[in-house]
Image (cartoon, rainbow, N blue to C red):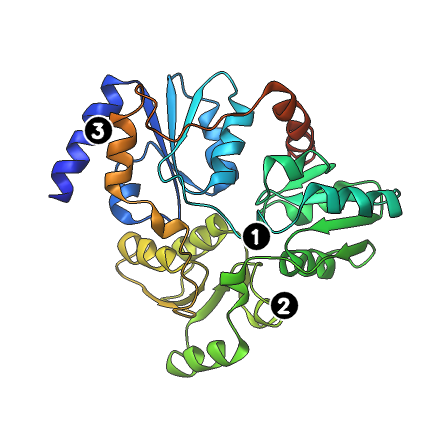
Amino acid sequence: MISDIQKKILQLKKEKNAVILAHSYQAKEIVEIADETGDSYALSVAATKHDCDAFIMCGVHFMAETVKMLSPQKRVFLANENAGCPMAEQMEPEMIQQLKEKEPDRTVVAYINTTAALKTVCDVCVTSATAVKICRQIENNKILFIPDCNLGSYVQKQLPDKDIKLLQGGCPVHASVTMADLEAVKKRHPDALVLVHPECRPEIAQAADYVGSTSGIMKFARESEAKEFIIGTEISITEHLQYECPDKEFYNLSKKILCPNMKLTTLMDVYKTLLNLDNGKGFEIQMDDELIKKARVCIDEMIRLGG
C-alpha cells in the first residue's frame, strides 16, 4: 500500500512539474519520495535551484513561508495545513518592536524558526548551524537573540565577548529533556557518544560530546569511528541514522523529543496535495510582496554573513 502511494506521488509530481521538500524530521516513507531533504534553511536554498511550477513542503508553516520568500514566483504548498511550530509562533512582532525601541543599540537576531511577520522586525536570521558564525560576524557587540533561549545560551557561551540578551522562548520538545533523562540513557549505554541539538537545555549541551544542527549531528554520526550514539534531537533522526549506518547503534536521548507538528504530515497528505494543486483545495502559502520584501531583509543578511 505504501509503495503504491509512493509510485502515484512520483508520477503526479512529474506530471505537475512539482518538487517535494521534506524536512529531516519527516517519516521515512516521505523522505523516500522527496526531491530534497534537509533542515529548514537547506531546503529553502535548495528550492531556489529547481525549475518547477510548485513546491510541496513536508514540514511546518514557517518553512513553507521561507521557501516562498526565497522563490516568490513559485507556488508553495504546505502538505498539512495544521503543521505549525510553537517556537515560531510564541513571540509577536509588536513585542519585539517595543524591545527595539527600548534598546535601539541592539542588533536583533532571529532564529529561522520564526514567522515571516516576526522576521520583518529583525535584523538578521540564523540557523542552528550558522548561529555562532553569524553572531561572531556581527560588528555590533550588543545582540537581542530570539526566540530560543537555549540556542541563544549556546551562542553566548561560544562568544563571551558579546553582550547577548535572551528572552524566555524556545522549542518545548527539545527543552523537555532533563539531565535525569541523559543520565538514565548514559547508564544503559556508557560507551555511546552524546550528540545533541542546541535547542536542548544548556546543561544537556554542556554534557554532550557534540552539539550541532540536525544536519551536523547526522554528518558527525556518519563520519565518526565510534559505534554507539545517543541522539538528542527529534527521534526520527535516530531512525534515519539506523538505516544509513546499519553497522552502528543509535539510541534516543529521550522518547519525549517527538515533534507532534512534524508528525502531522502523512504520505496521503502529500498525495492529496498533489491531486489538489489546481483546484483550490490544497493549502497554498499566500504572502504579499510587501511582507516578502520586509521579511527577506534578515534572510538576505544571513546569506551575506553566513557565506
Using the image, tell me which numbered label, if any, was put on residue 87: 1
Instruction: Give the quadrant of residue 126.
Output: top right
Instruction: State the image coordinates of residue 66 (x, y, percent, origin top left).
Output: 53, 33
Cα separation, mark 3 vs mark 1, equals: 33 Å
Determine which of the numbered discs, if any, sits on residue 50 in the image: none
Instruction: State which tag comes first along the sequence, 3 or 2.
Output: 3
Q: Nearer the viewer, residue 175 or 305?
A: 175
Type of amino acid under label 3: Leu
Direction front: furthest residue: 280
| Crowd class of label 3 (few under 14; some 14 to 19; many from 20; radius 10 Å) | some
Residue type at tag 1: Met
Q: N-terminal of the two: label 1 or label 2?
A: 1
Q: Earlier in the sequence, mark 3 or mark 1?
A: 3
- SS state under label 1: loop
Query: Which residue position is annotated with label 3?
Result: 10
Q: Amino acid at mark 2?
A: Pro
Q: Which mark is residue 202?
A: 2
> Which part of the image, by quadrant, shows the C terminus?
top right
In what element is the residue under mark 3? helix
Q: Quadrant of residue 51?
A: top left
Q: Residue at x 37, y 17 (%)?
A: 53
- For this view, does 213 lie left or right of residue 24? right
Residue 188 is situated, as x and y percent measured from the top left of the image, at 37, 82
- Crowding near pointer 2: few (<14 within 10 Å), some, many (20+)? some
Q: Position of residue 34 (x, y in %)?
A: 31, 35
